[in-house]
Image (cartoon, rainbow, N blue to C red):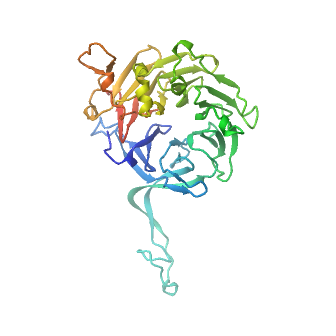
């Protein structure tokens, strides 16, 4: 399934399933949120289950101008996070660089008719002509999905927000920018608590920035944040109100023999995600994905090479700025497999039990319904086999930065620039 568009505003900037997987939200550079809903299986179309159709589209953020700093603030949606569903309505948080908004998405399929003070067309009636009392009745109408902003959390970040994460208490959430992490209560918009501040007294001494942050899925006092230096800090809010001293520090020592000019850039972590079980976390740097056991800080328990063949191309990737691309990663529902994106519209999946991996491509050709995805291989020189693609002919403008995995089933969503692809395991 895909949505065609060519304007840069349609470039998808975040993808997120809700807790049940029945809804899938995407945000784009134009500040819009599009929500897809999964079709229910029907008797006359038994194979239609799994198709996602547009459920609601709304403008979440508008471009703004910061007059104090004379800076333009983009409307681009950096992240979307769903809240667990409590009633018939759905709630999600969306953020651009500066402002987080809580949206309520609700359905209306009835409307009240028979007002006393108004005519059916909405005009007020002359009070002296009202002689009888009518009881309004609810009449069925076409289903309307309404998105309404419930809260706006603004003015708490000096730098660009890169992460939001809903806590497991379902009452608080954190937001992180380059130098600080704030903790919010979902009901309170005018203040937040600064729980991490790595800003040096003198900005010229700045050596690292925060790249991503996430709350632990079960322990509401624990969160992690990653840095541009390739380190991850785990913090416990019970220890102190300001978590400047971490409880755990995860870092893999660098192999001095492979050190190069690019070592620091490619070791920067672009995403960190706890496993659903809460025992592991996964980090993505430029060339690899690592899985860490929270009880072992000195090295990851698993390392997966995403596109090792690019190591010889770092010079040109630095020149065209691709080396700064921020790839995300995600777990499947049972934590047995992980997925992350690459270039040329390739994405990679790793099976943690068998250690098998596969490269797949999101493209027009294989996006027809029920089409099978063929594994792709990249060759790095010498003779090229029939099905392989040469590393020199990869398209670095086609990149898959954002992916999401259904929380319970083998359904994945892959954002390839301005197209959203949804793939699922074949139904027998």
Name, please, the residue furthest toward the left: 386
Residue 97 coordinates in the image, percent (x, y): 54, 46
Residue 363 is left or right of residue 300, and the answer is left
In the rendered image, which quarter contains the C terminus?
Answer: top left
- Which residue is at the front of the view, 212 or 94? 212
Give the residue drawn at x 38%, y 29%. 343
- Which residue is at the front of the view, 38 or 293? 293
Q: Is residue 156 above or below residue 298?
A: below
In the rendered image, which quarter contains the N terminus?
Answer: top left
Residue 338 is left or right of residue 153, and the answer is left
Name, please, the residue furthest toward the bottom: 128
Residue 169 coordinates in the image, percent (x, y): 64, 38
- Which residue is at the front of the view, 5 or 17? 5
Residue 251 appears in view: yes
Residue 233 is left or right of residue 116, and the answer is right
Q: Is residue 15 above or below residue 189?
A: above
- Which residue is at the front of the view, 280 or 109? 280
Give the residue drawn at x 41%, y 33%. 320
Residue 24 appears in view: no
Q: Quadrant of residue 220?
A: top right
Residue 238 coordinates in the image, percent (x, y): 74, 33
Q: Is residue 274 above or below residue 53?
A: above
Residue 380 is left or right of residue 409, and the answer is left
């Amino acid at each position: 399934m895909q949505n065609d568009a060519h304007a840069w505003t349609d470039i998808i900037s975040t993808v997120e399933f809700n807790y049940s997987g029945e809804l899938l939200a995407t945000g784009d550079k134009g500040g819009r949120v599009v929500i897809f809903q999964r079709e229910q299986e029907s008797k006359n179309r038994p194979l239609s289950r799994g198709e996602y159709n547009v459920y609601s589209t709304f403008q979440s953020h508008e471009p703004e101008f910061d007059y104090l700093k004379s800076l333009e603030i983009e409307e681009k949606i950096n992240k979307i996070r769903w809240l667990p569903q409590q009633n018939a309505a759905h709630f999600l948080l969306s953020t651009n660089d500066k402002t987080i908004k809580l949206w309520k998405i609700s359905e209306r399929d009835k409307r009240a008719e028979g007002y006393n003070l108004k005519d059916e067309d909405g005009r007020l009636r002359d009070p002296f002509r009202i002689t009888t009392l009518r009881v309004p009745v609810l009449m069925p109408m076409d289903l309307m999905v309404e998105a309404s902003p419930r809260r706006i959390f603004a003015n708490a970040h000096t730098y660009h927000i890169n992460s939001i994460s809903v806590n497991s208490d379902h009452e608080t959430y954190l937001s992180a920018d380059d130098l600080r992490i704030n903790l919010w209560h979902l009901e309170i918009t005018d203040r937040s608590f600064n729980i991490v501040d790595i800003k040096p007294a003198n900005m010229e001494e700045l050596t690292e920035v925060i790249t991503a942050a996430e709350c632990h899925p079960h322990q509401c006092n624990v969160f992690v944040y990653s840095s541009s230096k390739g380190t991850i800090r785990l913090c416990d809010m019970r220890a102190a109100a300001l978590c400047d001293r971490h409880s755990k520090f995860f870092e893999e020592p660098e192999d001095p023999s492979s050190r190069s000019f690019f070592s620091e850039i490619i070791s920067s972590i672009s995403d960190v995600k706890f496993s659903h079980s809460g025992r592991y976390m996964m980090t993505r740097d430029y060339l690899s994905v690592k899985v860490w056991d929270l009880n072992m800080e000195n090295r990851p328990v698993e390392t997966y090479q995403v596109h090792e063949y690019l190591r010889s191309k770092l010079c040109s990737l630095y020149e065209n700025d691709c080396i700064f691309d921020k790839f995300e990663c995600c777990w499947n529902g049972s934590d047995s497999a992980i997925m992350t994106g690459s270039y040329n519209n390739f994405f990679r999946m790793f099976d943690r039990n068998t250690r098998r991996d596969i490269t797949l491509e999101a493209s027009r050709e294989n996006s027809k319904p029920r089409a099978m995805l063929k594994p792709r291989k990249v060759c790095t020189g010498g003779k090229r086999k029939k099905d392989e693609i040469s590393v020199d002919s990869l398209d670095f403008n086609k990149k898959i930065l954002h992916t999401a995995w259904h929380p319970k089933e083998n359904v994945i969503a892959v954002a390839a620039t301005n197209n959203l692809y949804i793939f699922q395991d074949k139904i027998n």
